[in-house]
Amino acid sequence: MESQKSPESTEGRTLSITRLLDAPRDLVWEVWTNPEHIKNWWGPEGFRNTSDKMEVRPGGEWQFTMHGPDGTDYRNVHVYVELVKPERIVLQHVTGPKFVMTATFVEETGGKTRVHLHSLFESAEQLAHVIQVFKADVGMKQNVDRLEAYLSEQSTNLSHSKKLNPQS
């Protein structure tokens, strides 16, 4: 008997990654929701970005431009669908290609945070296209690598600051 995919099936339409980060969940949340932080790590290697608007609230928009290493600019607009501080962010990427990204942050022992990113595309063909053309699978990994490096830098700065100012 052949199994049939339901119209709601996500088979072949998802891209995801999970990583254990050596940073407290509140800090992870902060670097995801503050434009002064996210500009320093968002995107694949070699990219930088400029946020024009970041309204971190359900229905709010995050408008930004990713500047590629070759000088190409990629305009992006995400709409915040759901925010559960400090556990989950759901964003809808409304500029092409369209997808929904869910970022979950699970507090682990020892001040660590397990981050899971999950992007759901409109079709398997669309996902295959963004992997082939934009290397979205590699880009997602590099994005999390950059997040991890930035968090390490922030944790070091925070630790150093507390040593200098024990009252803070």
Image (cartoon, rainbow, N blue to C red):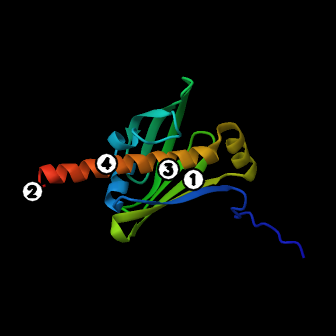
Q: Mark 3 points at which residue?
A: 144
Mark 1: which amino acid? Val
Q: Residue lying farthest left?
A: 167
Classify mark 1: residues with Cα within 10 Å, few (<14), some (14-19) or many (20+). some
Distance (Cα) linking label 4 and label 2: 19 Å
For the residue pair 98 and 124, the one nearer the viewer reads as 124
Q: Mark 1 points at which residue?
A: 100
For the residue pair 76 and 158, the one nearer the viewer reads as 158
Is residue 107 rendered to the left or right of residue 145? left
Distance (Cα) linking label 1 and label 4: 28 Å
Classify mark 2: residues with Cα within 10 Å, few (<14), some (14-19) or many (20+). few
Q: Which of marks 3 and 2 is nearer the N terminus?
A: 3
Mark 4: which amino acid? Gln
Residue contact at pointers 3 and 4, CB within 8 angstroms: no
Query: Residue at left 32%, top 59%?
Result: 26
Q: Which of marks 1 and 3 is nearer the N terminus?
A: 1
Is residue 143 rendered to the left or right of residue 154? right
